[in-house]
Image (spheres, rainbow, N blue to C red):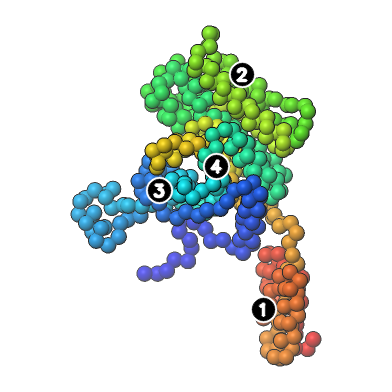
Amino acid sequence: MQMVKTPVNGMKDIEPREMEIRQYILSKIREVYGRFGFTEIETPNIEHIENLLSDQGWDNEKLIFKILKRGEKLDKAAESGNVNDLVDSGLRYDLTVPLCRFYSNNKDKLTMPFKAMQIGNVYRADRPQKGRFRQFCQCDIDILGEATNLGEIETLLATSTLLKEIQFDKYNFSFDINDRRILRAMVMYAGFSDEDFESVCITLDKLDKVGFDGVKKELLAKGYDESKIDKFNSLFDKGEISNNVGASTASPNSSVEVCEPVAAIRNLQNKIVGEPASDIDAELMNICNNLIEIIETVTKNIDVKINFNPTLVRGMGYYTGPIFEIKSEKFSGSVGGGGRYDKMVGKFMGADTPALGISIGFERIIGIYLDDNFVIPGSVKKIAYLIEKGMEIDKKSDIIKNALEERKKGNIVYVAELAKNKKFQCEKLEAIGYSEFKTFTNNS
């Protein structure tokens, strides 16, 4: 069988220039999130199949790379004729499910609330495209055991700080924010049943691809009443959503509040709340007040835009409260996202634990930087020492000694034999950041 030199479809090799940028960004992630009190953990790439197929990941559960049983167990399972019997584990599709398992298994040893940082590869049998791979690195921060909106505030502040410190603010990043409970209130207001909630949200999550007409068409195909669909769609201000209106432009410590997202939340709240207000309406008002408090606290303390987007769903079934996505003018989709998932830990422990987290779109950010020829700030000098073939031993030793002295200064020195095509050799080195070249010949 002939060996294949290209990566498996949806995977990629990482070249030196990209690896250097990746390592820089990863070091900044660990540094910034560490300053916010997040401590790093690691969980296995392979997870129990029961945990992965828990009806929490929505469509992602269809994209699991399943792992066959081994040895005698596989032979025995094959005899049963049931495909599901062949599998006992799979590659994780995100870091949240493994984190909840980790927490439930180690809770007594952890500081509360537990502020976790996870960096690792995840796997989805997705259709590969620009910015979407079957193996990709996720960088998550999560807070478990924090029931108040201090969790959301800290998470958004930490993420904003990180993106600014890696110079991503030049791409005008912003946050879209919503709350799953607001979505539920909208679905109920339109006349759908509670059992319809996930189905309606799965369709609404496709809005950016199919538009409002496409959402209506799919909901009709699912058999829902047109009057309910129209009432649901009437809650959305199409102009505001399409133009991304609602950005908060308050500067840090500003005494002047620019409250467009707050007004948008109040506008939607007023559409749903009835006369006289019920207990459900009172709960919705508390939810809206909570979201407003998050927005105002974050934007008063850091210069970042937060947009209220009532169509934001997030494609995971485990979210229970505030949800958010990171947007940028350099990428058509999101470059990160997360939210609150207060019911997930309870799947493992039998008792719910407040939890929330966010993941930055590491691969997409790296792709943007590569396209933009990103230069790592404060990079050390990179020098190439090119030595002619047949160099005398004593002379070669002096050259290497000189290279070691440069390395002690913190510079990077690449020592190699001078190629026949010096120009081509130098061009390749320039492509990975070498700016100074020293050629040593037998006659020099």
Which residue is painted at 66% across and 47% down in the image? 162
* Secondary structure state at the residue bearing disc 3: loop
* Secondary structure state at the residue bearing disc 1: strand
Single out the mark in the foreground, 3 or 1: 3
Mark with earlier residue (1, 2): 2
Q: CA distance from mark 3 to mark 4?
A: 31 Å
Looking at the rendered image, the quarter that the C terminus falls into is bottom right
Q: What amino acid is found at the position of numbered circle 2 in the picture?
A: Asn
Q: Give x and y (percent) for residue 282.
A: 54, 17
**Residue receiving disc 1:** 416
Q: What amino acid is found at the position of numbered circle 4 in the picture?
A: Pro
The correct choice, above or below, for 350 with respect to 256 in the image is below
Which residue is painted at 41% across and 18% down in the image? 225
Q: Are marks 3 and 2 in contact (CB under 8 Å)?
A: no
Mark with earlier residue (3, 2): 3
**Residue receiving disc 2:** 267
Q: Give x and y (percent) for residue 83.
A: 27, 49
